[in-house]
Image (cartoon, rainbow, N blue to C red):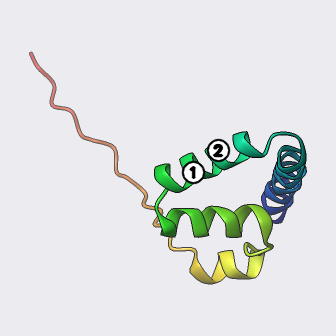
Amino acid sequence: IELEQRFYNTVGFAIKRVLSSLKINRPITLKIINLLYILLLNKKKRLRLENRIFNKTRTIELFNEHNHYMIYRLKPKVREKVI
């Protein structure tokens, strides 16, 4: 989980660098990208994505606290013999 979070933070750092470059060199392109981002993702999804990419919100402690995976052991199905 922490390795995954570090990966997302690295992606977030790269995105910040690209955005700062676009702000200086191509501000109109940046405005169009920002508009598409707002139109394509609702506010809740944008907030969750930004938290995941730019903040350190996912930790092993939180994962263990909210982990609700259900693991079942399935019985093999008994087959009838056809004569």
Is 9 or 37 nearer to us in this picture?
A: 37
Give me the disc on residue 7. none
- Label count reads 2
* Residue at x 64%, y 44% (from the top left corner): 33
Quarter of the C terminus within the rendering:
top left
Q: Is residue 68 left or right of residue 13?
A: left
Which x, y percent locates residue 55? 79, 72
Tell me if label 2 and label 1 are in contact, CB under 8 Å.
yes
Residue wearing tag 1: 35
| Residue that label 2 marks | 33
| Cα distance between the residues tagged 2 and 1 | 5 Å
The residue located at (48%, 49%) in the rendering is: 40
**Of 20 and 46, the residue lying toward us:** 20
Q: Percent x, y for residue 36? A: 55, 46
**Residue with the most extreme top position:** 83
Dividing the picture into quarters, in which one does residue 73 lie?
A: bottom left
